[in-house]
Structure formats: C-alpha cells, structure tokens
Amino acid sequence: VLLVNAALAASVSGFVSPSSSSALTRNIGLATKDGFHPTSTNHRAISSLKAAQEDNLDVFIRDMLKISGFVYDFRNIRNIVKTNDLVTKKRRTGWFRSEEYKVEFDTPALVLTQKGAQEVDKNKFFKYTVTPDAIKLFIEKNRKWFSEPEGGGDWTFDESASEKTDPFVLESSIKDVMQDNLKIVDYDDEFSTNDGGLVYAVVVNLTRKWVAVVFRGTVGSSDIATDQNFNFDYDSFFDSEYI
C-alpha cells in the first residue's frame, strides 16, 4: 500500500514515474497522469486485501449487533435477580391453598458485582470483570427461576421454579460470544427501569482487539419523553464529581 501511494504521489508531484520495464512497475504497477495501473498480480493482491477488509467490517458489525442485543438481555437478567433474590413469596398449590417459599439464586455474584469484597472504583460501577462464561454458568445454575417466551424474548421470573433441562434461546447467543476472549469491564443499570433510564456497558474483546461502549436505546415511555425534551438539563446525578 505504501509503494502504491508513493507511486501515485510521484506522478502527481511531477516526478518521473518508473518505466514500464522497471522492477517496481513489474511488481506493483505503473503510475501515470491518468491514474495508477496495477499489474495483474498486484490487482489480485489489492482485490484480496479489499475482500479481507470487507470481511473484517462484516464481522465487526455482527459483533457490535450481538453486544448491543446483549446489553438489553443482561439488564433483564440482572433486574430479575435484584428484584427477587432472598424474597419470600407465595405460590398457589391448589384452589384454596398456597405456600410460602424463599427465592435464593445460586451464586448471584456471577452477574451482580456490587456485594463483592473488592474496593469501589469511583470511575466504574462494576467491582470486578464479568465474562460470558460466568453468565452462562449462572443461567445453568438458576434456569428454574427464569421463563423465556417460545422462540426467545424478554425473560420473566418463574414463580413455579420448575426445573428446566433444555437451554434457553439466549444461551446459544452467549455461547456464540464465548468463542472470543471477551470481558465486560463495566456495566451500569443503576438508574434504569423497564420503562427507560440509563444502561451502558464497556466491553473488551481481546481476541479481535476492540473496545465497545454500548448504550441501551429507547425502550419505554420514560425514554420517549426524554427523547422529545430538547431543553438543557442543568441537573446531574454526579454534581459532587465536578471540578
């Protein structure tokens, strides 16, 4: 690529480009005032490079779409755990009978980091990194507490706590993400509800060498009202952090 740019620069600047018999021309191509004319060999190389770049872009876009969807799903899982863990509930066992039971998720620290012994970092919400492997393990340990619509969709809490052996649709997506060395270094859904609010994730893919900051989009009436408000907002949750 550098040789191609050098040849083009020489032609534009008035320098004499290599003759058609030179080694540079035979291996790269000939630069003239009409443009750059690659050799057949180099033309194939350029085409291959372009195809590889397009493939990389396609892979990157697919990765971003997966992570974007994950931001929604992960918030849903965490919300079910935070809302129901260690809560005593009642369920019907007959027409006029019910029984109390206590919800206890197995190893919630796999997805909720705030009760960890690690020190709080004022620059992030997570106390420690979470991986797709940890999320998958949490789901396998707690599948009975979740219910998923047929064909996939938003999970809900399963009050029946029925044992389930078949994996959820979401698990296949997580398994797909696990092919890369991916880490969720931060995820903040503290100021969020099912009707809107702030949700974002910072994800690092060490295999493909990219970092993504992903925000949840508009999901409900609260977000819609915010989207329609174009007034300046002078309030902040973090006024004390201003210098």
Image (cartoon, rainbow, N blue to C red):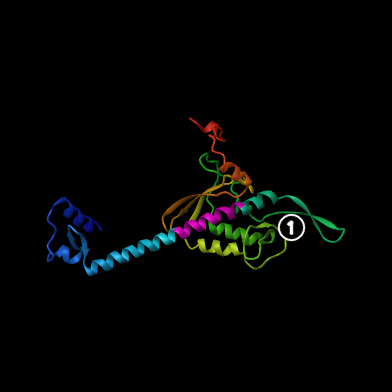
* SS at circle 1: loop
Instruction: Write down the region rendered in magenta.
Output: 61-75
Label 1 sits on residue: 159
Residue at figure coordinates x 68%, y 60% from the top left? 147
**Drawn side of residue 213 relative to residue 95, left or right:** left
Residue at figure coordinates x 57%, y 42% from the top left? 228
Q: How many badges with numbers are in the image?
A: 1
Q: Which percent across, then down, holds residue 194?
A: 64, 49
Residue at figure coordinates x 68%, y 56% from the top left? 156
Please identify the dominant SS of the magenta region.
helix
As rendered, which of 243 and 183 lies closer to the eye? Answer: 243
Q: Quadrant of residue 151?
A: bottom right
Q: Is residue 40 visible?
A: yes
**Drawn side of residue 157 relative to residue 55, left or right:** right
Q: Which percent across, then down, holds residue 171?
A: 58, 63
Q: Within 10 angstroms of label 1, few (less than 14), some, or many (20 or more) residues?
A: some
As rendered, which of 88 and 21 lies closer to the eye? Answer: 21
Q: Which percent across, then down, holds residue 31?
A: 18, 60
Residue 216: in magenta span: no
**Drawn side of residue 29 relative to residue 159, left or right:** left
